[in-house]
């Protein structure tokens, strides 16, 4: 059974949140796939991960890279998983493939966007029906996360 987490972004943006979550995944020894809602968003995340900190970056690969299978982090707008990731992040309304076979699936959604909230509710119901263990986390004003369900 896949553990599915819903991260409700209310205090920080996706760009501020995703790199830290990816780092935590890598610390666990997991490979990650980040699936965005469009190729343009993949390109923006690609640039972000190379420059998100002054003292470092997150090595990764993006769609159409011949070396994707060797990377710990892979960015895509498709359902592919060329690096054999154990965790799949879904951002910007990406249409989720079946999450069976992953250790964890993570939906990150903007809490200030009504369409994103509705999509998260729909995905919650679908993942619950698929028998996955589901948790819901909301950002706290001072930073960090609070488990709500």
Image (spheres, rainbow, N blue to C red):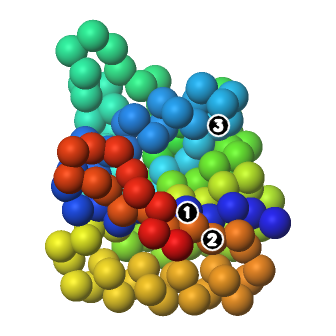
| Residue 77 percent coordinates (x, y) | 45, 60
Camera-side mark, 3 or 2:
2
The residue lying at 48 percent from left, 30 percent from top is: 23
Tag 3 near tag 2, CB within 8 Å:
no
Please give the residue where the numbered disc 2 appears in the rendered image: 134
Kindly identify which numbered label has been placed on residue 31: 3
Q: Is residue 132 visible?
A: yes
The N terminus is located in which quarter? bottom right
Q: CA distance from mark 1 to mark 2?
A: 6 Å
What crowding class fits label 2: few (fewer than 14 Cα within 10 Å), some (14-19), or many (20 or more)?
A: some
The residue lying at 73 percent from left, 73 percent from top is: 132
The residue lying at 20 percent from left, 52 percent from top is: 141
Of marks 3 and 2, which one's residue comes earlier in the chain? 3
What crowding class fits label 3: few (fewer than 14 Cα within 10 Å), some (14-19), or many (20 or more)?
A: many
Please give the residue where the numbered disc 1 appears in the rendered image: 5
Tag 1 near tag 2, CB within 8 Å:
yes
**Secondary structure under badge 3?**
loop
**Secondary structure under badge 1?**
strand
């Amino acid at each position: 059974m896949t553990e599915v987490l819903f991260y409700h972004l209310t205090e920080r943006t996706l760009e501020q949140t995703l790199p830290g979550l990816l780092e935590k995944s890598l610390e666990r020894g997991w490979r990650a796939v980040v699936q965005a809602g469009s190729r343009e968003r993949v390109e923006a995340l690609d640039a972000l991960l190379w420059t998100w900190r002054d003292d470092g970056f997150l090595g990764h690969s993006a769609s159409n890279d011949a070396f994707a299978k060797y990377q710990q982090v892979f960015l895509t707008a498709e359902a592919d998983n060329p690096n054999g990731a154990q965790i799949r992040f879904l951002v910007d309304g990406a249409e989720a493939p079946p999450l069976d076979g992953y250790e964890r699936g993570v939906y990150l959604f903007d809490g200030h966007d009504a369409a994103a909230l509705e999509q998260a509710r729909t995905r919650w119901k679908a993942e619950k029906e698929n028998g996955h263990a589901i948790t819901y986390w909301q950002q706290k004003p001072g930073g960090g996360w609070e488990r709500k369900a």
